Image: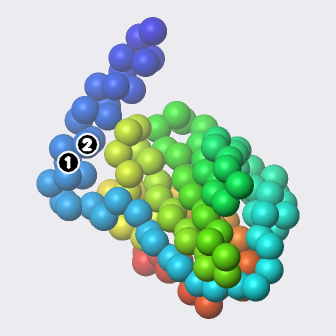
Amino acid sequence: MLSGLILVFIGMCISPFLMFFGSKPKILLNFTTSKEIWSDVELWAKEQGYAMKNKTETERFYKKRDGSLILSSCLSIRQDGDTIHVEAWILIIFKKVAIDDMRLMGNSFRRDSATQINKLLMALGSPVMITVRA
């Protein structure tokens, strides 16, 4: 109970700070592919330790926590015909922050999240990758 209250308090302190700096909420990528992607996506999630949180016929949502219950790497992917829509972000308590937003995040977690998601993007044939500055 006390740990939950502490996390809520930390979230209340961090959220205004992030809004003050105008953090962008997520990375959006779109590309085309002629293949069915879900087997590649499911294999990637299993290899990288992402848990599926929501699934429909055309969309999946995955989340991976860092172990502290404060940071989570999130990915939403949708296939509309040949078009793939990818949204990626890091969740700090309850606030979305783009993986490439370097103003507040620890470098190793951002870099690890970007590397893991880039592995999926490469497997799906995306011409665009996520770049994380130091």
**Res 112 visible:** no
When asked about the image quadrant of residue 65, the answer is: top right
Could you say whether the residue bearing mark 2 is in a helix, strand or loop?
Answer: helix
Q: Where does the image place residue 66, in percent across and percent down from the top left?
A: 58, 44
The residue at the point 46 percent across, 64 percent down is 99
**Is 132 drawn above or below residue 74 in the view shown?**
below
Task: Determine the image quadrant of residue 58.
Answer: bottom right
Residue 22, horizontal then vertical, whole percent? 20, 61
Residue 91 tag number: none
**Quarter holding the C terminus?**
bottom left
Kindly identify the amino acid type of the residue bearing the numbered disc 2: Ser
Q: Residue at x 23, y 35 (%)?
A: 13
Foreground: 29 or 131?
Answer: 29
Which percent across, then down, holds residue 37?
77, 70
- The residue that disc 1 covers is 17
Residue at (25, 42) in percent of width and height: 15
Residue 84 is at least partly visible in this image: yes
Q: Callout 2: few (<14), some (14-19), or many (20+) C-alpha neighbours within 10 Å?
A: some
Work out how far the residue at label 1 is from the one at label 2, CA to CA, in angstroms.
5 Å
Relative image position of residue 43 (x, y in whole percent): 84, 60
SS category of the residue bearing label 1: helix
Q: Quadrant of the N terminus?
A: top left
Write the residue at 43% across / 18% down: 4
Mark 1 and mark 2 residues within 8 Å of each other at the beta carbon: yes
- In the displayed structure image, the side of residue 98 where residue 87 appears, left or right: right
Q: Amino acid at mark 1?
A: Phe
Q: From this viewpoint, which residue is outermost toward the top?
A: 1
- For label 2, the residue is 15
